[in-house]
């Protein structure tokens, strides 16, 4: 065999095999996901989120006191001052459960609000000059870039929710001696709601390229959710069929933040409930937003 052909055969034998398309896309998605996490740390977004979590946990650990006397009386104190108390042994567990429900509702609202505020800027960075060209120059589908940005944001907030609610559960359980596993329902419900809201953020960001507009639209949807949920009252008060149908259409078009918050309180209290229709409608809303964002982003020439 001539020397040139022998060298060529040796090079071909030593060359690594070409990656299959699924493996290439999987590795590219992992790299984009890691890039999203690194950018969050570089922008100090994560420090703000987890700093807020540390503050809430420190408040529960050092400021909130639950004193139980002889298993019959529970007293809750804030800054050393008695805030609530109960003297009935049979109401002790319900009393602590009520406090856990209030904290779960508070953490639900705070986590979703802060998550949207923080991650809207992270999604809008796709359209920053220089940053967009760098990401879009990679030989991967545009939709994969958008999906990695969405999943990275959801994972950042989900980890914070686990830390915040799991830490709160441990602190409250240690202080009261009442380990209520239903309190942990706040983790999947809060994470699910944020994933739905983040889908709306991604859609508005793709449409406008502006994080401020995405935050405003999402916050408006959150504010109007409890108003639009009053369908029975609206049907009685609205004067025309057109107005009532318009109300119903608006209700279907916004995330069910209020109803999911009410679902969380029901789950924490241990009451039975059928959440399937509510979860299905919210998941369909998120899927529609993500699909629209995917298609629009794939067609844009930025």
Image: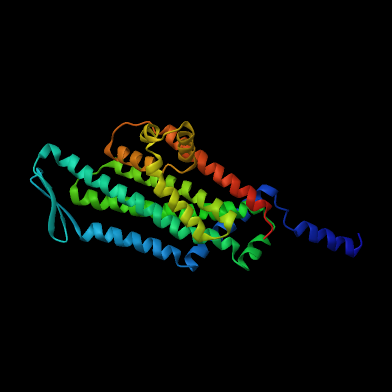
> Depth check: 19 or 108 in front?
108
Which corner quadrant of the image does residue 229 belong to?
A: top left
Which corner quadrant of the image does residue 71 belong to?
A: top left
Identify the residue at horizontal 51%, vertical 41% (top origin).
Answer: 285
Instruction: Quadrant for the C terminus, please.
Output: bottom right
Q: Would residue 295 appear left or right of 255 to someone viewing this image?
A: right
Question: What percent of the width, then of the height, locates residue 68?
Answer: 12, 48
Question: What percent of the width, then of the height, locates residue 139?
Answer: 70, 57
Figure check: 32 above or below 188 = below
Name the residue furthest right: 2
Figure check: 208 above or below 87 = below
> Depth check: 113 or 29 in front?
113
Identify the residue at horizontal 37%, vertical 32% (top origin).
Answer: 236
> Depth check: 197 or 178 in front?
197
Identify the residue at horizontal 46%, vertical 52% (top origin).
Answer: 218
Residue 261 seen from this side: yes
């Amino acid at each position: 065999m001539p020397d040139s052909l022998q060298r060529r055969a040796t090079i071909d034998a030593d060359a690594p095999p070409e990656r299959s398309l699924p493996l290439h896309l999987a590795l590219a998605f992992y790299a984009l996901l890691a890039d999203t996490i690194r950018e969050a740390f570089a922008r100090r977004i994560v420090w703000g989120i987890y700093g807020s979590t540390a503050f809430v946990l420190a408040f529960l650990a050092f400021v909130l006191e639950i004193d139980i006397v002889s298993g019959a009386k529970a007293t809750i104190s804030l800054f050393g001052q008695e805030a609530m108390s109960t003297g009935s042994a049979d109401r002790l567990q319900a009393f602590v459960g009520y406090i856990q429900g209030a904290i779960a509702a508070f953490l639900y609202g705070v986590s979703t609000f802060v998550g949207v505020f923080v991650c809207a800027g992270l999604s809008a960075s796709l359209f920053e000059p220089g940053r967009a060209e760098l990401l879009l120059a990679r030989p991967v589908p545009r939709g994969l870039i958008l999906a990695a940005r969405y999943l990275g944001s959801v994972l950042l907030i989900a980890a914070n929710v686990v830390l915040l609610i799991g830490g709160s559960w441990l602190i409250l359980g240690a202080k009261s001696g009442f380990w209520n596993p239903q309190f942990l329902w706040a983790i999947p419900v809060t994470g699910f709601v944020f994933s739905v809201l983040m889908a709306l953020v991604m859609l508005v960001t793709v449409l406008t390229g502006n994080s401020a507009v995405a935050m405003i639209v999402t916050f408006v949807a959150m504010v109007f959710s409890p108003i639009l949920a009053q369908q029975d009252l609206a049907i009685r008060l609205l004067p025309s069929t057109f107005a009532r149908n318009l109300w119903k259409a608006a209700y279907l078009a916004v995330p069910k933040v209020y109803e999911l918050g009410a679902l969380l309180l029901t789950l924490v209290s241990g009451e039975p409930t059928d959440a399937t229709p509510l979860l299905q409608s919210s998941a369909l809303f998120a899927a529609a937003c993500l699909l629209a964002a995917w298609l629009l982003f794939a067609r844009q020439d930025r």
